[in-house]
Image (tube, helix red, strand yellow):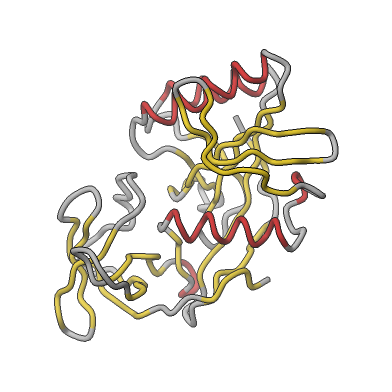
Amino acid sequence: MELLRLNVVPCTFRKRLNRFVALVEVDGEERKALVTNTGRLEEFMVPGRKAFCTPKTGGKTDFVLVAFEDLGGKGAVIDTRTQAKAFERALEFGLVPWLRDCRIKRKEITVGKSRLDYLFECPEGEVYAEMKSAVLRGGNKGEYAMYPDCPSLRGQKHIRELIELSKAGKKAMIFFIGAMPGVERFRPYGRGDPEIARLLREANKVGVEIHALGISLLPDGRVVLERPSLEIEL
């Protein structure tokens, strides 16, 4: 199902200049594009790979690097802002089974020394939640969306906060956006950060809910829901 429609422009990835800026080619000209995803993204950021950008105004970049062309010509969405908007639209449409009848009460909630992405209001009470981007493909058939692709102290801190919330009797959740076509399952990538893999297993044991959904980008700019719920393997 269509969740969003973006004004995408075909582009070609050239190189990553720094953590937040990439050099892309648009209509034969080299331009700078904003990168919102702080992961390494090495499987996608290959010089010459086809990608999708959206125009932007202001700042030191002309575009946002939204996605890379992937299976079947669909886009793997690396832009975390697009991932969040797609998730929020899916929630609004009632397409997220693990948040049925819930609504966003607040965003950017300070908990301990961290800021979590969402506080949901659900029939059973409030749920504190963190969203993470899973755009590393794994499995013999490429069926897994994985996180993280590199060490993340920030990610570790968020999971520890969720664990403490759950131990204190509050409802806590972490969910992953498997933003690639064809993914069916989620699992942590132990080589990326073994501590996060361990923390997710601990979180699961103390009652933190762990979920994932799948989205992708069509070449015409439509962001679609691939799977409302991915299987979780820890």
Left or right: where does residue 118 sit relative to residue 53?
Answer: right
* Quadrant of the image occupied by residue 30: bottom left
Q: Residue at x 24, y 72 (%)?
A: 62
Left or right: where does residue 75 sit relative to residue 21?
Answer: right
Q: Position of residue 70 (x, y in %)?
A: 43, 66
48 shown above or below 200: below
Q: Position of residue 71 (x, y in %)?
A: 47, 67
Q: Position of residue 183 (x, y in %)?
A: 57, 55
Q: Residue at x 51, y 40 (%)?
A: 108
13 shown above or below 29: above
Give the quarter of the figure containing the C terminus.
top right
Q: Residue at x 47, y 47 (%)?
A: 133
Q: Nearer the viewer, residue 6 or 108?
A: 108
Left or right: where does residue 81 sit relative to residue 44?
Answer: right
Residue at the limit of the structure toward the right, as seen here: 123
* Quadrant of the image occupied by residue 14: bottom left
Q: Nearer the viewer, residue 144 or 66?
A: 66
Question: How many callouts does the rendering have?
Answer: 0
Residue at the limit of the structure toward the top, as seen here: 167
Left or right: where does residue 62 sit relative to residue 223?
Answer: left
Q: Residue at x 19, y 67 (%)?
A: 32
94 shown above or below 217: above
Give the quarter of the figure containing the N terminus.
bottom right
114 shown above or below 98: above
